[in-house]
Image (tube, rainbow, N blue to C red):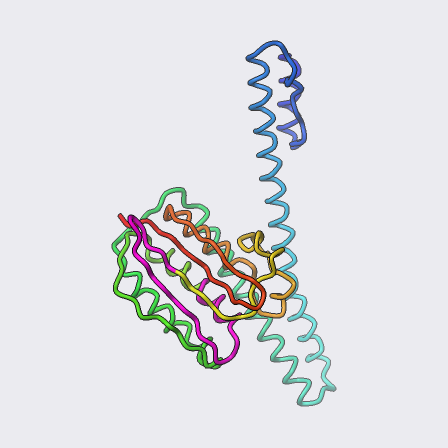
Amino acid sequence: PLNTIINATEEITEGNYSTRLPFDDTKIYEYAVLGDKFNRMAEELNSVEMLRNDFINNFSHEFNTPINSIQGFATLLKHGNLSPEEEQDYIDRIITSSDRLSTLAVNVLNLSKIEQQTILTHKEKINVTEQLRRMIVLLSIRWEPKNIEFDFDCPEYYLTGNEEFLEHLWLNLLDNAIKYSPIGSTIDIRIRKLDKSLEIVIRDHGKGIAPDALPHIFDKFYRSKSSRAVPGTGLGMTIAQKVAILHRGTITVDSAPGEGTAFTVTLPVE
């Protein structure tokens, strides 16, 4: 049994995370427990490796797409022989791809910074109501062209947290609601005081999310088929969830096709 454990451990160190110990039916209790723990460890390592590979593949795809677009249209512009309309179109596409690349880089840096935090630091008392107002003003360049209104009339509520991280949380949720809101619609924001927490709900009145896409909303780089026509990186909801968890809170989504989408954030109040 010890040689079996040694050989299996060597397999793990070489990256073979599919290795398992056959100790399920052993009569030696200690070996059975060890085998069970070892196999669970191998499963977790395999899951982490799969997530890492998926992240690298998705990031490479998301990163290369705008770069290839910029390179292609820049090459066409360099060759010349284009009409003024074509030139303007290609320039606009280069600007759009550059914006996407910049947003992707910022989101990856923000996600990396948040994921490195194991405990919440730089905590202070924050007026959540006022913070949401400031984020709405900050995003006015997004919602004003769509004539979107906000139904947001809440008392002043406070909690203790990291102001910078919470700003990322609200910005991503509000930006998501704005992107999927129809022209001339309303975004509802509600804050409710529970026993030992605050419940913040941000609801849009867009086309909603398909049932098969809901379980993947918080996955890195995930974008449903219906959302790919809207600019985005697929990291906003991941960042929002990480911030909520770091604050010992939760974030859930409630949506159905044609009925809009509501994100509910619950954060403890110290």
Quarter occupied by the N terminus: top right
Quadrant for residue 149, please give it.
Answer: bottom left
Q: Give the number of callouts.
A: 0
Residue occupying image coordinates x 33% and y 47%: 121
* Residue 247 vertical position relative to residue 175 in the rendered view, above or below: above
| Residue appearing at x 45%, y 50% in the figure | 242
Magenta segment includes 265: no
Q: Measured from the top left, where is residue 150 in percent x and y?
A: 39, 74
Query: Vertical placement of 98 versus 29: above or below?
Result: below
Judging depth in this view, the residue of 76 and 102 nearest the camera is: 102
Position of 83 with respect to 146 (left or right) is: right
Q: Nearer the viewer, residue 230 or 13?
A: 230
Q: Is residue 182 left or right of residue 161?
A: right
Residue 235 percent location from the top left of the image? 53, 57
Taking the spot 65% from the left edge, 51% from the top edge, the residue there is 57
Which one is nearer the viewer's eye here, 87 or 263? 263
Residue at the farthest bottom position: 84
Q: Residue furthest top?
A: 27
The magenta stretch spans residue 175: yes
- Residue 270 x, y percent position in the rendering: 26, 48
What is the span of residues highlighted in magenta in the rendered image?
173-200
191 with respect to 214 (left or right): left
Relative side of 76 to 240, left or right? right
Image coordinates of residue 74 in percent, x first then y, are 66, 75
49 is higher (above) or lower (below) than 182: above
